[in-house]
Image (cartoon, rainbow, N blue to C red):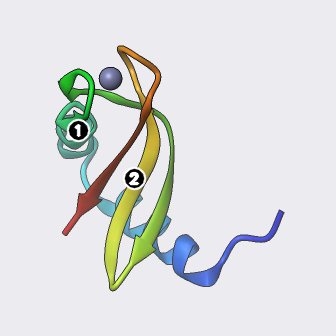
Amino acid sequence: MTIKPTDQLAKKRWEAIPGDVRKKLEDNVFCSSCGVTTIVNYEVDSTDFMIILKGSCKTCNGQVARVID
Ligand SMILES: [Zn+2]
């Protein structure tokens, strides 16, 4: 599996955020079915210099994403 350089950078930037802040962001993701939920099993991606978390809703297992700017 090949990881794009931008994804590596996004991952590093994400991991540079303090753990308690990351936890708050993970717990504040919008799901179209459940409203505010927790993102699980996510991967870190990026676009336009913003970090994007792409994963699953903890409640309904639907696809959710969160932009970190
Ligand atoms: Zn959901």
The residue located at (34%, 85%) in the rendering is: 48
Q: Which residue is mark 1?
A: 29
Taking the view exactly as shown, the residue that stands out farthest to the front is 33
Mark earlier in primary sequence (2, 1) = 1
Tell me if label 2 and label 1 are in contact, CB under 8 Å. yes
Q: Are there few (<14), some (14-19), or many (20+) residues within 10 Å of tag 2?
A: many
Q: Which residue is mark 2?
A: 53
Q: Is residue 63 left or right of residue 6?
A: left
Q: Quick one: SS at disc 2?
A: strand
Q: Nearest the camera: 8 or 53?
A: 53
In this rendering, is residue 67 above or below 56? below
**Mark count:** 2
Q: Position of residue 14 (x, y in %)?
A: 37, 60
Rendered-image quadrant of the C terminus: bottom left
In this rendering, is residue 12 above or below 15? below
Which image quarter: residue 27?
A: top left
Q: Position of residue 47 (x, y in %)?
A: 39, 78
Which image quarter: residue 23?
A: top left
Q: Quick one: SS at disc 1?
A: strand
The amino acid sitting under disc 2 is Leu
The residue located at (25%, 33%) in the rendering is: 32
Q: Nearest the camera: 68 or 33?
A: 33
Which image quarter: residue 52?
A: bottom left
The residue located at (83%, 62%) in the rendering is: 1
Q: Position of residue 21 (x, y in %)?
A: 18, 45
